[in-house]
Amino acid sequence: MSLAKPQMRNLLQAAIKKNLAITAGVTTAAVAAYYFLVKAPRKQKYAEFYKNYDAEAEFERMRKLGLFQACSKDD
Amino acid sequence: MSTWSQLSFQDSASPLMEELIMFHDHAMLVLTLVTTLVGYIILTMFSNKFIDRFLLEGHLIEVIWTVIPAFLLIFIALPSLHLLYLLDEYDNPSLTIKSMGHQWYWSYEYSDFLDIEFDSYMIPSKDLEDNQFRLIEVDNRMIVPMNTYVRILVSSTDVIHSWTVPALSVKADAIPGRLNQLTFLVNRPGLFFGQCSEICGANHSFMPIVVESISMNSFLNWINNFE
Protein backbone atom coordinates (compact mmCIF):
# COMPACT_ATOMS: atom_id res chain seq x y z
CA MET A 1 0.00 0.00 0.00
CA SER A 2 1.56 3.27 -1.04
CA LEU A 3 0.15 6.76 -0.81
CA ALA A 4 -0.52 8.81 -3.96
CA LYS A 5 2.36 11.19 -4.70
CA PRO A 6 1.47 14.60 -3.32
CA GLN A 7 1.81 17.70 -5.45
CA MET A 8 5.43 18.81 -5.12
CA ARG A 9 5.65 21.88 -7.36
CA ASN A 10 3.65 24.94 -8.39
CA LEU A 11 1.75 24.95 -5.13
CA LEU A 12 1.49 28.73 -5.14
CA GLN A 13 0.27 28.82 -8.74
CA ALA A 14 -2.38 26.24 -7.99
CA ALA A 15 -3.47 28.13 -4.88
CA ILE A 16 -3.58 31.39 -6.81
CA LYS A 17 -5.76 29.87 -9.55
CA LYS A 18 -8.14 28.42 -6.97
CA ASN A 19 -8.30 31.66 -4.98
CA LEU A 20 -8.73 33.75 -8.12
CA ALA A 21 -11.76 31.70 -9.06
CA ILE A 22 -13.24 32.04 -5.56
CA THR A 23 -12.43 35.76 -5.46
CA ALA A 24 -14.07 36.31 -8.83
CA GLY A 25 -17.21 34.61 -7.57
CA VAL A 26 -17.32 36.36 -4.20
CA THR A 27 -16.64 39.86 -5.55
CA THR A 28 -19.15 39.40 -8.37
CA ALA A 29 -21.73 38.32 -5.79
CA ALA A 30 -20.95 41.30 -3.54
CA VAL A 31 -21.11 43.84 -6.37
CA ALA A 32 -24.26 42.25 -7.79
CA ALA A 33 -25.85 42.34 -4.33
CA TYR A 34 -25.08 46.04 -3.95
CA TYR A 35 -26.33 46.77 -7.46
CA PHE A 36 -29.60 44.83 -7.22
CA LEU A 37 -30.38 45.57 -3.57
CA VAL A 38 -29.31 49.22 -3.33
CA LYS A 39 -28.39 51.03 -6.55
CA ALA A 40 -31.08 49.79 -8.94
CA PRO A 41 -34.00 50.04 -6.44
CA ARG A 42 -32.96 53.59 -5.54
CA LYS A 43 -32.88 54.65 -9.19
CA GLN A 44 -36.26 52.96 -9.70
CA LYS A 45 -37.76 54.73 -6.68
CA TYR A 46 -36.64 58.12 -7.95
CA ALA A 47 -37.95 57.35 -11.45
CA GLU A 48 -41.32 56.27 -10.07
CA PHE A 49 -41.58 59.27 -7.78
CA TYR A 50 -41.00 61.74 -10.57
CA LYS A 51 -42.86 59.85 -13.33
CA ASN A 52 -46.27 61.29 -12.54
CA TYR A 53 -45.18 63.93 -10.07
CA ASP A 54 -47.39 67.00 -10.03
CA ALA A 55 -45.42 69.71 -8.24
CA GLU A 56 -48.32 72.18 -8.25
CA ALA A 57 -50.70 69.64 -6.67
CA GLU A 58 -48.12 68.79 -4.02
CA PHE A 59 -47.63 72.50 -3.37
CA GLU A 60 -51.38 72.98 -2.89
CA ARG A 61 -51.53 70.00 -0.52
CA MET A 62 -48.69 71.40 1.58
CA ARG A 63 -50.08 74.92 1.50
CA LYS A 64 -53.45 73.74 2.85
CA LEU A 65 -51.63 72.02 5.70
CA GLY A 66 -50.22 75.41 6.68
CA LEU A 67 -46.58 74.49 6.13
CA PHE A 68 -45.54 77.64 4.31
CA GLN A 69 -44.78 81.08 5.64
CA ALA A 70 -45.04 82.84 2.28
CA CYS A 71 -48.63 81.79 1.56
CA SER A 72 -51.58 81.26 3.84
CA LYS A 73 -53.46 77.99 4.08
CA ASP A 74 -56.78 79.70 3.34
CA ASP A 75 -57.83 80.13 -0.29
CA MET B 1 -33.75 67.32 6.94
CA SER B 2 -31.89 64.46 8.51
CA THR B 3 -33.56 62.31 11.13
CA TRP B 4 -31.78 60.57 13.95
CA SER B 5 -29.48 57.67 12.99
CA GLN B 6 -29.60 58.74 9.33
CA LEU B 7 -26.32 57.76 7.66
CA SER B 8 -27.31 58.32 4.04
CA PHE B 9 -27.98 61.43 1.98
CA GLN B 10 -31.23 63.33 2.38
CA ASP B 11 -33.77 62.84 -0.43
CA SER B 12 -32.82 65.13 -3.27
CA ALA B 13 -34.79 68.24 -4.17
CA SER B 14 -32.72 69.13 -7.19
CA PRO B 15 -31.69 67.21 -10.33
CA LEU B 16 -27.99 67.69 -9.54
CA MET B 17 -28.36 66.22 -6.06
CA GLU B 18 -30.06 63.24 -7.65
CA GLU B 19 -27.06 62.79 -9.95
CA LEU B 20 -24.70 63.06 -6.99
CA ILE B 21 -26.61 60.34 -5.13
CA MET B 22 -26.44 58.05 -8.18
CA PHE B 23 -22.70 58.75 -8.53
CA HIS B 24 -22.21 57.88 -4.88
CA ASP B 25 -23.90 54.52 -5.52
CA HIS B 26 -21.55 54.01 -8.48
CA ALA B 27 -18.48 54.76 -6.35
CA MET B 28 -19.78 52.44 -3.62
CA LEU B 29 -19.96 49.61 -6.18
CA VAL B 30 -16.23 49.97 -6.80
CA LEU B 31 -15.52 50.25 -3.07
CA THR B 32 -17.52 47.09 -2.40
CA LEU B 33 -15.50 45.26 -5.05
CA VAL B 34 -12.14 46.40 -3.65
CA THR B 35 -13.10 45.77 -0.02
CA THR B 36 -14.39 42.28 -0.77
CA LEU B 37 -11.29 41.45 -2.80
CA VAL B 38 -8.82 42.71 -0.22
CA GLY B 39 -10.80 41.18 2.64
CA TYR B 40 -10.79 37.77 1.01
CA ILE B 41 -7.05 37.99 0.29
CA ILE B 42 -6.36 38.86 3.95
CA LEU B 43 -8.45 35.86 5.05
CA THR B 44 -6.52 33.49 2.78
CA MET B 45 -3.26 34.88 4.17
CA PHE B 46 -4.29 33.60 7.61
CA SER B 47 -4.58 30.01 6.35
CA ASN B 48 -1.63 30.14 3.96
CA LYS B 49 1.41 27.99 4.96
CA PHE B 50 3.59 28.82 1.93
CA ILE B 51 7.15 29.94 2.62
CA ASP B 52 9.65 31.35 0.12
CA ARG B 53 12.96 32.24 1.72
CA PHE B 54 14.35 33.64 -1.54
CA LEU B 55 11.49 35.92 -2.54
CA LEU B 56 12.90 38.96 -4.31
CA GLU B 57 10.63 40.29 -7.02
CA GLY B 58 7.57 39.48 -9.08
CA HIS B 59 7.25 41.59 -12.19
CA LEU B 60 4.02 40.02 -13.40
CA ILE B 61 2.14 40.54 -10.11
CA GLU B 62 3.45 44.12 -9.89
CA VAL B 63 2.08 44.88 -13.35
CA ILE B 64 -1.26 43.25 -12.52
CA TRP B 65 -1.80 45.11 -9.28
CA THR B 66 -0.89 48.40 -10.94
CA VAL B 67 -2.99 48.08 -14.09
CA ILE B 68 -6.17 46.81 -12.43
CA PRO B 69 -6.39 49.72 -9.92
CA ALA B 70 -5.67 52.13 -12.78
CA PHE B 71 -8.71 50.78 -14.64
CA LEU B 72 -10.82 50.99 -11.50
CA LEU B 73 -9.79 54.61 -10.99
CA ILE B 74 -10.66 55.49 -14.58
CA PHE B 75 -14.01 53.77 -14.08
CA ILE B 76 -14.68 56.10 -11.14
CA ALA B 77 -13.12 59.21 -12.67
CA LEU B 78 -15.15 59.35 -15.88
CA PRO B 79 -18.60 59.84 -14.34
CA SER B 80 -17.03 61.95 -11.58
CA LEU B 81 -15.57 64.47 -14.04
CA HIS B 82 -18.78 64.45 -16.07
CA LEU B 83 -20.73 65.39 -12.94
CA LEU B 84 -18.11 67.92 -11.85
CA TYR B 85 -18.48 69.88 -15.06
CA LEU B 86 -22.27 69.48 -14.98
CA LEU B 87 -22.32 71.10 -11.53
CA ASP B 88 -20.48 74.12 -12.93
CA GLU B 89 -22.82 74.68 -15.84
CA TYR B 90 -24.40 78.08 -15.93
CA ASP B 91 -27.97 78.42 -17.16
CA ASN B 92 -28.93 82.10 -16.76
CA PRO B 93 -30.66 82.15 -13.41
CA SER B 94 -33.97 84.02 -13.28
CA LEU B 95 -33.56 85.15 -9.70
CA THR B 96 -30.60 86.37 -7.65
CA ILE B 97 -30.60 86.36 -3.86
CA LYS B 98 -27.79 87.60 -1.66
CA SER B 99 -27.16 85.62 1.48
CA MET B 100 -25.04 87.43 4.07
CA GLY B 101 -23.59 85.65 7.07
CA HIS B 102 -23.49 87.40 10.41
CA GLN B 103 -22.65 86.37 13.93
CA TRP B 104 -25.00 84.56 14.37
CA TYR B 105 -27.75 84.72 11.76
CA TRP B 106 -28.23 84.92 8.02
CA SER B 107 -29.76 87.82 6.14
CA TYR B 108 -31.27 87.61 2.69
CA GLU B 109 -31.58 90.34 0.08
CA TYR B 110 -33.85 90.12 -2.95
CA SER B 111 -32.79 93.13 -4.96
CA ASP B 112 -33.80 92.02 -8.46
CA PHE B 113 -37.09 93.90 -8.45
CA LEU B 114 -38.02 95.48 -5.15
CA ASP B 115 -35.54 96.01 -2.35
CA ILE B 116 -36.42 93.18 -0.02
CA GLU B 117 -34.15 92.45 2.94
CA PHE B 118 -34.74 90.44 6.08
CA ASP B 119 -32.82 88.63 8.79
CA SER B 120 -33.19 84.94 9.51
CA TYR B 121 -32.64 83.94 13.12
CA MET B 122 -32.93 80.47 14.60
CA ILE B 123 -36.12 79.93 16.60
CA PRO B 124 -35.02 79.21 20.20
CA SER B 125 -36.13 75.84 21.53
CA LYS B 126 -38.38 77.40 24.14
CA ASP B 127 -40.36 79.20 21.40
CA LEU B 128 -40.94 76.20 19.14
CA GLU B 129 -44.43 75.23 18.01
CA ASP B 130 -45.46 71.56 18.26
CA ASN B 131 -44.79 70.89 14.58
CA GLN B 132 -41.37 72.54 14.44
CA PHE B 133 -37.89 71.02 14.61
CA ARG B 134 -35.35 71.86 17.27
CA LEU B 135 -32.28 73.92 16.27
CA ILE B 136 -33.04 74.03 12.54
CA GLU B 137 -36.12 76.27 12.29
CA VAL B 138 -35.85 79.98 11.55
CA ASP B 139 -38.21 82.91 11.95
CA ASN B 140 -37.94 84.13 8.32
CA ARG B 141 -37.25 81.50 5.71
CA MET B 142 -35.60 82.09 2.35
CA ILE B 143 -38.43 81.83 -0.17
CA VAL B 144 -37.74 80.58 -3.69
CA PRO B 145 -40.00 79.61 -6.59
CA MET B 146 -39.83 75.95 -7.62
CA ASN B 147 -38.58 74.80 -11.03
CA THR B 148 -36.70 78.08 -11.47
CA TYR B 149 -32.95 78.60 -11.68
CA VAL B 150 -31.87 80.60 -8.67
CA ARG B 151 -28.51 82.24 -8.06
CA ILE B 152 -27.32 82.79 -4.48
CA LEU B 153 -24.44 85.20 -3.84
CA VAL B 154 -22.93 84.31 -0.50
CA SER B 155 -20.83 86.64 1.59
CA SER B 156 -20.30 87.71 5.16
CA THR B 157 -20.13 90.86 7.24
CA ASP B 158 -17.77 89.57 9.90
CA VAL B 159 -16.11 86.13 10.10
CA ILE B 160 -16.23 83.21 7.68
CA HIS B 161 -19.50 81.25 7.66
CA SER B 162 -20.75 78.66 5.19
CA TRP B 163 -24.17 78.50 3.55
CA THR B 164 -25.43 75.06 2.66
CA VAL B 165 -28.59 73.06 1.92
CA PRO B 166 -27.68 69.37 1.55
CA ALA B 167 -30.90 68.43 -0.27
CA LEU B 168 -29.96 70.88 -3.03
CA SER B 169 -26.26 69.86 -3.17
CA VAL B 170 -25.05 73.41 -2.53
CA LYS B 171 -22.46 74.73 -0.14
CA ALA B 172 -20.30 77.84 -0.30
CA ASP B 173 -18.19 79.64 2.23
CA ALA B 174 -19.39 83.09 3.22
CA ILE B 175 -16.17 85.09 3.29
CA PRO B 176 -16.07 88.79 4.16
CA GLY B 177 -15.06 90.89 1.15
CA ARG B 178 -15.83 88.08 -1.31
CA LEU B 179 -18.87 86.95 -3.30
CA ASN B 180 -19.30 83.23 -3.90
CA GLN B 181 -21.93 82.16 -6.39
CA LEU B 182 -24.21 79.12 -6.13
CA THR B 183 -26.89 78.14 -8.62
CA PHE B 184 -29.58 75.58 -8.18
CA LEU B 185 -33.07 74.54 -9.19
CA VAL B 186 -35.58 73.15 -6.69
CA ASN B 187 -37.82 70.65 -8.48
CA ARG B 188 -40.38 70.08 -5.75
CA PRO B 189 -42.19 72.23 -3.15
CA GLY B 190 -41.39 72.01 0.53
CA LEU B 191 -38.95 73.04 3.23
CA PHE B 192 -35.25 72.28 2.96
CA PHE B 193 -32.88 72.72 5.86
CA GLY B 194 -29.21 73.45 6.29
CA GLN B 195 -26.81 74.57 8.98
CA CYS B 196 -23.85 76.93 9.04
CA SER B 197 -20.82 74.88 8.02
CA GLU B 198 -17.81 76.95 9.05
CA ILE B 199 -16.88 77.56 12.65
CA CYS B 200 -17.79 81.14 13.41
CA GLY B 201 -17.99 81.55 17.14
CA ALA B 202 -20.15 80.64 20.10
CA ASN B 203 -23.43 80.21 18.18
CA HIS B 204 -22.05 78.58 15.06
CA SER B 205 -24.40 75.61 15.60
CA PHE B 206 -27.39 77.90 16.05
CA MET B 207 -27.68 79.77 12.75
CA PRO B 208 -29.58 77.41 10.45
CA ILE B 209 -30.86 77.92 6.93
CA VAL B 210 -34.38 77.08 5.74
CA VAL B 211 -35.34 77.28 2.08
CA GLU B 212 -39.08 77.36 1.35
CA SER B 213 -39.89 76.30 -2.21
CA ILE B 214 -43.32 77.44 -3.44
CA SER B 215 -45.16 77.96 -6.72
CA MET B 216 -44.15 80.88 -8.92
CA ASN B 217 -47.52 82.61 -8.45
CA SER B 218 -47.27 82.40 -4.67
CA PHE B 219 -43.70 83.66 -4.84
CA LEU B 220 -44.73 86.69 -6.89
CA ASN B 221 -47.58 87.39 -4.45
CA TRP B 222 -45.13 87.17 -1.55
CA ILE B 223 -42.75 89.58 -3.27
CA ASN B 224 -45.51 92.08 -4.00
CA ASN B 225 -46.93 91.93 -0.48
CA PHE B 226 -43.63 91.99 1.38
CA GLU B 227 -43.35 94.65 4.08
Image (cartoon, helix red, strand yellow):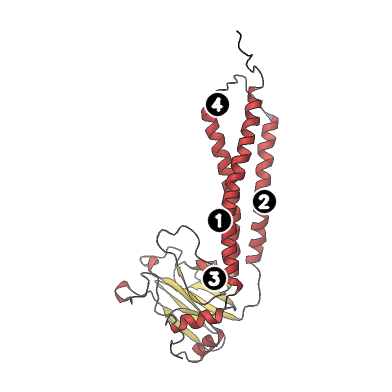
Q: CA distance from mark 4 to mark 3?
A: 51 Å
At label 1, which amino acid type do we have?
A: Val
Mark number displayed over residue A38: 1
Figure quadrant of the C terminus of chain B:
bottom left
Is label 1 or label 3 in front?
1
Which residue is disc 4 drawn over? Answer: B48
At label 3, which amino acid type do we have?
A: Ala
Residue at screen point 65% across, 37% down: B65
Under circle 4, the secondary element is: loop
Q: CA distance from mark 1 to mark 2?
A: 19 Å
* Front-most of residues B107 and B93: B93
At label 2, which amino acid type do we have?
A: Phe
- Determine the residue located farthest toward the top in the rendered image: A1
- Determine the residue located farthest toward the front in the rendered image: A1
Task: Mark 3 vs mark 2: tell me if same chain.
Answer: yes
Residue B140 on image: x %, y %: 42, 80
Q: Residues within 10 Å of mark 4 (few under 14, many from 20)?
A: few
Please state the chain letter of the residue tagged with numbered disc 4 in the rendered image: B
Under circle 3, the secondary element is: loop
Mark number displayed over residue B75: 2
Please state the chain letter of the residue tagged with numbered disc 1 in the rendered image: A
Residue A51 on image: x %, y %: 61, 72
Task: Mark 4 vs mark 2: tell me if same chain.
Answer: yes
Q: Quadrant of residue B206?
A: bottom left
Task: Mark 1 vs mark 2: tell me if same chain.
Answer: no
Q: CA distance from mark 1 to mark 3?
A: 20 Å
Residue at screen point 49% across, 86% down: B116
Which residue is disc 3 drawn over? Answer: B13
Q: Is residue B158 visible?
A: yes
